Amino acid sequence: MSSGRRPIIELRQVEKHYLMGAFLVKALDGIDLTVFEGDYISILGPSGCGKSTLLNILGCLDQPSVGEYLLEGRDVSKLEDDELSQVRGKRLGFIFQSYNLIQQLTVVENIEVPLYYQGVPESESRGIAVDLARQVGLGERLDHRPTELSGGQQQRVAIARALANDPAVILADEATGNLDSKSGGDILKIFDDLNAAGKTLIMITHDEKMADRTPRVIRLKDGQIVFDSGGNPDAAGKAVAIKQG
């Protein structure tokens, strides 16, 4: 249940517009969404429904054309680029389908990258990175480079890197999309464990089975939320569509 938990994300009538020639396209249309601390959410929908646009706004990679985005009570919808960069670096963790690791760096050095940009001294960052590598099962591969790792191991590095700054929210974009079923299952188990430890996770996915394991499921269609099972862990099988798609 959401009762007693702090809202960590609040979107209020958010729209995102793009010009395509002479036409105005609404990639997002009137999004109202509250994410509570400790939520574990899957966002699903067909191609072109607005999933990636929503993720970009949630991740402060883009800004709404209309509406408000409150992150931990702060309106970030109209911040300047350098302020958005600071928010991303300090309060948000990203996990992408393509891992986005730096090939020349070792496992532990890749995990340290966000700490470097936040000015954490190496004497401190190295210990944090080693602890995180061990947390995701890579304690024996600290000095390996990405080319020496499997896809599942590279995604583990990406997860550890996303955790380096102790973010308020972790955003995962098709995080198991390039993995085989076993490796994908291992990554989802890490997500489950992180949420059990209190982390807030939001996953963009097209995989219904992946969504089945999250307590909250949100569906998009034509830039609108057409279904939200809410924050109740028992709601996924009981919820009804809040709009007809």
Image (cartoon, rainbow, N blue to C red):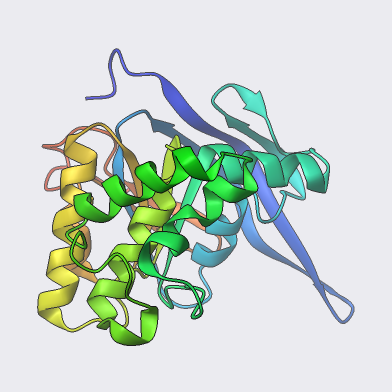
Q: Is residue 55 above or below residue 69?
A: below
In the rendered structure, the answer to whether residue 84 lies left or right of residue 20 reads left
Q: Is residue 79 visible?
A: yes
Residue at horizontal 59%, vertical 58%? 56
Q: Measuring from the top left, give residue 59's x and y in whole percent.
A: 57, 50
Q: Which quadrant of the view contains residue 145? A: bottom left
Residue closer to the observer: 235 or 112 = 112
Q: Measuring from the top left, give residue 207's x and y in whole percent.
A: 25, 72
Residue closer to the observer: 32 or 245 = 32
Quarter of the image that includes the N terminus: top left
Q: Measuring from the top left, give residue 84's x and y in whole percent.
A: 72, 43
Residue at horizontal 37%, vertical 70%? 174
In the rendered structure, the answer to whether residue 2 lies left or right of residue 18 reads left
Residue at horizontal 52%, vertical 74%? 102
In the rendered structure, the answer to whether residue 97 lies left or right of residue 24 reads left
Residue closer to the observer: 101 or 233 = 101
Q: Is residue 58 visible?
A: no
Residue placed farthest to the right in the image? 22
**Total tally of numbered discs in the picture:** 0
Residue placed farthest to the front in the image? 123
Q: Which quadrant of the view contains residue 70? A: top right
Quarter of the image that includes the C terminus: bottom left
Q: Is residue 187 above or below residue 167?
A: below
Residue at horizontal 43%, vertical 78%? 98
Q: Measuring from the top left, give residue 51's x and y in whole percent.
A: 49, 63
Residue closer to the observer: 6 or 208 = 6
